[in-house]
Amino acid sequence: MAILCAIATLIFALCSLFAGNRASTLHTQSLETVRAKTSSKTDAIATLQTQLNAAGTEIETLQKNLNAEKAGSDDLRKQLSATRKSLEQTQKELAASRLELNRMKTVHTDNPALPEVSPTPPAPQTPSTPLPEPATPPEPSEPDVSAAE
């Protein structure tokens, strides 16, 4: 009976040893699986972080471009405003010149002895050439009353 108990103890010890080894193997496999999943998730997080950094850089670049476009737009608005003011001033000067021309024509028809004034068309202007300063017309001279006497 003692031999049977010894054999049963040995069998039990061997089964325990096999079961322990199997449990250890399963635990090791489980750890490896967890490590693999963790590693793939870590890689995915690193990839997302890289994409996020790239998106942040792109947003910064777009923001800089937007600010530059806004500044350019503001400059164009200022230029447009200055051009409109210049146009208004030129239109006023043109109207004044036309009035003066009409006045001079009227003076000429009243006094045919004066030389005829022929209007000359303005020289074509290019955007890079500044407009000439308006010329002031000469004051009409008074007829000499002493020569008539």
Image (cartoon, rainbow, N blue to C red):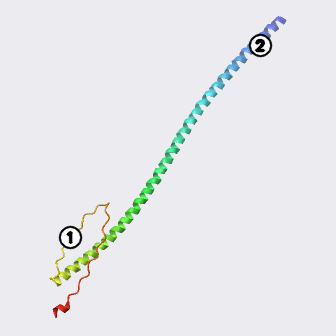
Q: Which residue is mark 2?
A: 13
Amino acid at dot 2: Ala
Residue 120 shows which numbered tag?
A: 1
Considering every residue shown, the one lying at the far front of the view is 147
Along the viewing direction, whichever of 73 and 133 lies nearer the viewer: 133
Badge 2 marks a residue whose secondary structure is helix
Location of residue 19 in the rendering, given as x and y in whole percent from the top left corner: 72, 17
Along the viewing direction, whichever of 90 and 137 lies nearer the viewer: 137
Left or right relative to 113: residue 129 = right
Badge 1 marks a residue whose secondary structure is loop
> Residue at 35% of width from left, 66% of height from top?
84
Location of residue 68 in the rendering, given as x and y in whole percent from the top left corner: 45, 53
Are there few (<14), some (14-19), or many (20+) residues within 10 Å of tag 1? few
Amino acid at dot 1: Thr
Q: Is residue 42 visible?
A: yes
Considering every residue shown, the one lying at the far left of the view is 112
Along the viewing direction, whichever of 139 and 34 lies nearer the viewer: 139
Q: Quadrant of residue 32?
A: top right
Along the viewing direction, whichever of 73 and 113 lies nearer the viewer: 113
> Residue at 20% of width from left, 70% of height from top?
120
- Find the distance from the CA under tag 1 to the CA under tag 2: 125 Å
Of the numbered discs 1 and 2, the one sitting upstream in the chain is 2
